[in-house]
């Protein structure tokens, strides 16, 4: 074999070696990235789509949160309105203790001189006397009334039971303390008008003392109220 032939073989070997090295590096580079160009484009498109969906979901969350806050706010307002209405109904029904300006009456029997043949109970405070006082106070605008801490409501009874007076089925004894919340001036003047109720009671030998009060507390009605026949129309 001559030198020219050996040289050709050597050149071809070198060229083949270079080609193998280039091919090997290209293969290694592709394996290191692990992602083809087309695949990268697909992933980019998917990423942008996911970003759009995430943004849309975020907007939906904000919208739902706002609606939930409004719903909760509306429910709270509704509950407050119902509570306010319930308090108003209790106030009208007399099942709440109330306070305010008004008058306080102390009505009592006075010692009576012995009168042969005359029943001393004639000069004692009777149930009808208390009824007249309550009616007079109501007419004068009293908003809450009690007799010896028994709240007078629409269903209250004031009646004679034997030799005693019952208010709301509770026996009350003299002195009778009547509290009435309202305009003190109007309440007092309506009772003390000349020829009026107080003057009449005093003529009957009954002690009546009236005081104006800046603040009175009238207790709540403590009895039970139920209706067997009356229904909402």
Image (spheres, grey):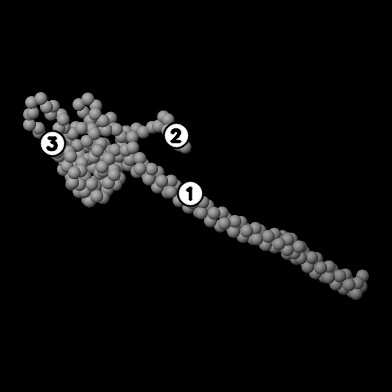
* Mark pair 2, 3: CA separation: 45 Å
- Mark 2 surroundings: few (<14), some (14-19) or many (≥20) residues within 10 A: few
Q: Which residue corresponds to mark 1?
A: 75
Q: Report the quarter where the N terminus lies.
A: bottom right
* Mark pair 2, 1: CA separation: 30 Å
Q: Position of residue 126 (x, y in %)?
A: 20, 32
Q: Position of residue 87 (x, y in %)?
A: 37, 45
Q: Earlier in the sequence, mark 2 or mark 1?
A: 1
Query: Vertically, is 143 above or below 166?
Result: below
The residue at 42%/30% (across/down) is: 229
- Mark 1 surroundings: few (<14), some (14-19) or many (≥20) residues within 10 A: few
Examine the rendering and report whether any part of residue 171 can be seen: no
Query: Vertically, is 183 above or below 118?
Result: below
Q: Position of residue 83 (x, y in %)?
A: 41, 46
**The quarter of the displayed image where residue 171 is located:** top left
Q: Which residue corresponds to mark 3?
A: 205
The residue at 12%/29% (across/down) is: 120
Q: Residue furthest front?
A: 195
The residue at 86%/70% (across/down) is: 12
Q: Position of residue 17 (x, y in %)?
A: 81, 67
Q: Which residue corresponds to mark 2?
A: 231
Q: Please name whichever residue, 77 or 38, is drawn nearer the observer in this view of the structure.
A: 77
Secondary structure at numbered mark 1: helix
Marks 3 and 1: which is nearer the front? 3
Q: Does the CB distance between marks 2 and 1 fall below 8 Å?
A: no
Q: Is residue 14 left or right of residue 196?
A: right
Q: Earlier in the sequence, mark 2 or mark 3?
A: 3
* Mark pair 3, 1: CA separation: 61 Å
Q: Does the CB distance between marks 3 and 1 fall below 8 Å?
A: no
Examine the rendering and report whether any part of residue 227 can be seen: yes
Marks 2 and 1: which is nearer the front? 2
Query: Vertically, is 24 above or below 220?
Result: below
């Amino acid at each position: 074999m001559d030198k020219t032939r050996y040289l050709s073989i050597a050149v071809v070997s070198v060229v083949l070696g270079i080609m193998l090295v280039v091919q090997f590096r290209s293969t290694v580079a592709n394996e290191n990235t692990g992602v083809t160009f087309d695949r990268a484009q697909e992933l980019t498109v998917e990423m942008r789509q996911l970003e759009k969906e995430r943004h849309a979901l975020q907007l939906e969350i904000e919208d739902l949160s706002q609606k939930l806050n409004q719903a909760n706010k509306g429910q709270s307002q509704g509950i407050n309105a119902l509570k306010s209405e319930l308090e108003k109904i209790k106030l009208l029904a007399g099942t709440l203790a109330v306070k305010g300006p008004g008058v306080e009456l102390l009505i009592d029997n006075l010692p009576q001189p012995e009168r042969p043949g005359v029943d001393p109970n004639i000069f004692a405070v009777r149930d009808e006397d208390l009824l007249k006082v309550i009616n007079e106070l109501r007419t004068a605008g009293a908003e809450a009334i009690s007799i010896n801490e028994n709240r007078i409501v629409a269903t209250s009874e004031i009646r004679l039971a034997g030799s005693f007076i019952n208010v709301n089925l509770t026996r009350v004894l003299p002195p009778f303390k009547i509290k009435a919340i309202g305009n003190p001036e109007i309440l007092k003047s309506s009772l003390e008008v000349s020829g009026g109720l107080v003057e009449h009671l005093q003529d009957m030998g009954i002690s009546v003392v009236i005081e104006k009060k800046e603040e009175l507390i009238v207790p709540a009605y403590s009895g039970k109220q139920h209706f067997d026949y009356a229904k909402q129309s």
